[in-house]
Amino acid sequence: MADTVTITDNRTGESIEIPIVDGGVAASEWRRLLPDIWFYDPAFVQTAGCASSITLVDGEQGILRYRGYPIEQLAEKSNFLEVAYLLLFGELPAAAELDEWTHNITHHTFIHENMRKRFLEGFHYDAHPMGMLVSAVAALSTFYPEAKQIFDPDSRKKQIVRLIAKMPTLAAAAHRFHVGMPFVYPDNSLDFASNFLSMMWKTAEPRYAANPALAHAIDVLFILHADHEQNCSTTAMRVVGSSHADPYSACAAAASALYGPRHGGANEAVVQMLLEIGHIDNVDAYIRRVKAGEVRLQGFGHRVYKSYDPRAKIIKRVADEVFAVTGVNHLLDIALKLEEVALSDDYFLSRKLYPNVDFYSGLIYQAMGFPINMFPVLFAIPRTAGWLAHWKELLDQDSKISRPRQLYVGHPERDYLPLSERGA
Ligand code: SDX
């Protein structure tokens, strides 16, 4: 049997055979037979918008690999900056490459003083940190106009380093502004995760000393959130990047997509859901509301994973590490009960709804003292590496500008209606 499909236009009886390549069939082949017939696939449920070699997600098997490396091995043996390098450049760095990469990221963590004093401090006192981050990333494009030279390899690499390095600084600055605390400058003697925690939590002490277990937990969570193939925000990055916008503007678009509660805002929604449930005795009633379609079980379900999200399994182990330091988050009991009830109920099993990456991550962040409104920000920091890897890949592939077609279902042609003839 050939790896092909045959399509026939029954209006003409004409057929063509199309090869199945890398798990897909090329729409350009379809166009040979049906030039003005479009695949109708709102939300791209059954559509591949690109060919990518960065990340593999196998939803049926619950597999996630970055450049072929299983997420379980990277979470156990690697660190976020090394994983960011892997995603961006395709291979694990040699020692000298890792040292140079780490040095460059470490020495680009500062932001322009005007970004802090005039931009971030210009927000309303209770501005949501994610709204501030989205705006700040876009604003960075005005500080680095050379970023528009997207085909200059040196400029491209410098903007990539700047964005990965400055996201934690912007994230922490947004939080400090939101809670009325003074801005904390980066400490270049600290590793990536510890420096972020220092910028978040340092108060009067001369030097912030991050708890190693918590810094490690943050680093693992950053690894788990670094990329996830063509998720909503990465698709936004690729679409905006395809117009040859600068990487800061494209990242701001991606961060905006991540802000939504269906995507990166889900970990915030999970904790709010658990707070609303309030006690394990209320779990059954909440599950009934979910099954009645009144509410969604936040942190459950996934467009691709139709089995347990492999990241959720790892996060549950990280949770134990964190809770050993912080004390168990009392919401954990409710989350575990929700998972137990849902995974024994056919409503969820028949729809293949399992915990995803967001179901437990919020509990860890909350136990570590992060306010709920910082949760999508914590997702954006590591996902910047994935967004930039896909941005770089689409440019290297010389991709065309993204411009899908539509099925027009509006009015046929009609003449202008004078005001006097229009209805009430
Ligand atoms: C992330 O894409 C990625 O890779 C994303 C991500 C990444 O790393 O980038 O993995 C990160 O965004 C994880 C997802 C976080 N979002 C949530 O946890 C929010 C709650 N989940 C849902 O809103 C939903 O599951 C989505 C948005 C995640 C997926 O939506 P789909 O694929 O469009 O699925 P669907 O809405 O068509 O649902 C299929 C069925 C429906 O039931 P029926 O209409 O067929 O009866 O399942 C039901 C839905 O009603 N359903 C849920 C549900 N999710 C889907 N019912 C209750 N609770 C839920 N959470």
Image (cartoon, helix red, strand yellow):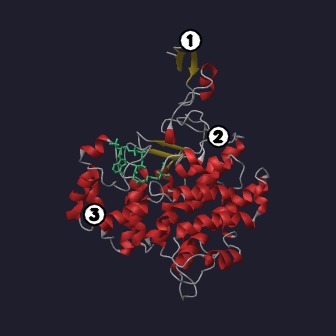
Which residue is located at x 34 percent, y 46 percent? 353
Q: Rounded to the nearest whole Å, what is the CA distance between mark 3 and mark 1?
A: 60 Å
Q: Mark 3 vs ligand 1: CB under 8 Å? A: no
* Label 1: element kind: loop
Residue type highlighted by circle 3:
Ile
Residue type highlighted by circle 1:
Thr
* Label 2: element kind: loop
Q: Earlier in the sequence, mark 3 or mark 2?
A: 3
x, y percent for residue 245: 71, 53
- Displayed quadrant of residue 327: bottom left
| Viewer can see residue 5 | yes
Are circles 1 and 2 on residues that touch, CB within 8 Å? Answer: no
Left or right placement of residue 352 versus residue 174 in this view? left
| Residue designated by label 3 | 334
Which residue is located at x 50 percent, y 80 percent? 179
Left or right placement of residue 162 versus residue 20 in this view? right
Which residue is located at x 62 percent, y 41 percent? 416
Are circles 3 and 1 on residues that touch, CB within 8 Å? Answer: no
Mark 1: few, some, or many residues within 10 Å (few <14, many ≥20)? few
x, y percent for residue 28: 63, 27
In this rendering, the answer to whether 310 lies above or below 81 is above
Q: Nearer the viewer, residue 285 or 163?
A: 285
Residue type highlighted by circle 2:
Arg
Which residue is located at x 40 percent, y 70 percent? 366
Specify the label residue 403 is tagged with: 2
Closer to viewer: mark 3 or mark 1: 1
Closer to viewer: mark 3 or mark 2: 2
